[in-house]
């Protein structure tokens, strides 16, 4: 017998707000039962659960997402995510168009934006 990952859980001081950010990033809805002030929020289609903890983030993530844009370039996606509330953390883009960008979500969790499949094929 094996196990399956049911959720990837984010510790957060505001589950609903952070879940809304990631909902917009991924284009997936929050669970219909989630509301501001709830102790947890869920993006069911992505298996992302956001739960209340009293303390803020203190160190680098030990696990992070690498996002690959599906319908735009890496740079267009970085611009979109910054407009949603992400923050630029590290820029690893190279002069030849390769590389990635490290952003943080509104609570400081790092994630990367890689080149799209079309950019990799080009």
Image (spheres, rainbow, N blue to C red):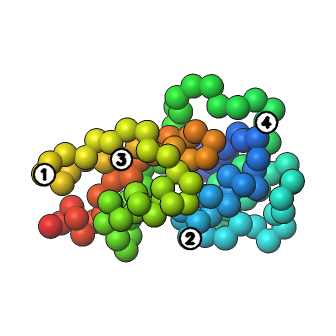
Element assignment for label 2: loop
Q: Quadrant of residue 35?
A: bottom right
Counting from the top left corner in percent of width and height, residue 70 is at 38, 70
Q: What residue is at 15 percent from the left and 67 percent from the top?
A: 122
Query: Mark 2 packing: few (<14 Cα in 10 Å), some, or many (20+)?
Result: few
Closer to us: 82 or 115:
82
The label number, if any, that marks residue 101 in the structure image: 3
| Residue where numbered disc 4 is placed | 53
Q: Earlier in the sequence, mark 4 or mark 3?
A: 4
Which mark is first along the chain, 1 or 4?
Answer: 4
Label 1 – label 3 distance at C-alpha = 14 Å
Residue 73's quadrant in the figure? Answer: bottom left
Residue 95 placement (x, y as % from top left): 14, 48
Q: How far separated are the C-alphas under marks 1 and 2?
A: 30 Å
Lower sequence index among marks 2 and 4: 2
Residue that mark 2 sits on: 27
């Amino acid at each position: 017998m094996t196990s399956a990952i049911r959720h990837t859980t984010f510790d957060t001081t505001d589950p609903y707000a952070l879940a809304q950010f990631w909902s917009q990033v991924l284009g997936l809805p929050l669970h219909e039962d989630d509301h501001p002030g709830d102790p947890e929020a869920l993006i069911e289609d992505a298996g992302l659960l956001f739960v209340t903890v009293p303390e803020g983030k203190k160190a680098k993530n030990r696990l992070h997402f690498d996002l690959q844009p599906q319908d735009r370039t890496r740079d267009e996606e970085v611009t979109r995510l910054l407009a949603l509330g992400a923050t630029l953390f590290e820029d690893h883009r190279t002069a030849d168009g390769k590389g990635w960008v490290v952003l943080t979500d509104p609570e400081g969790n790092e994630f990367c934006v890689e080149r799209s499949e079309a950019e990799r094929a080009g």
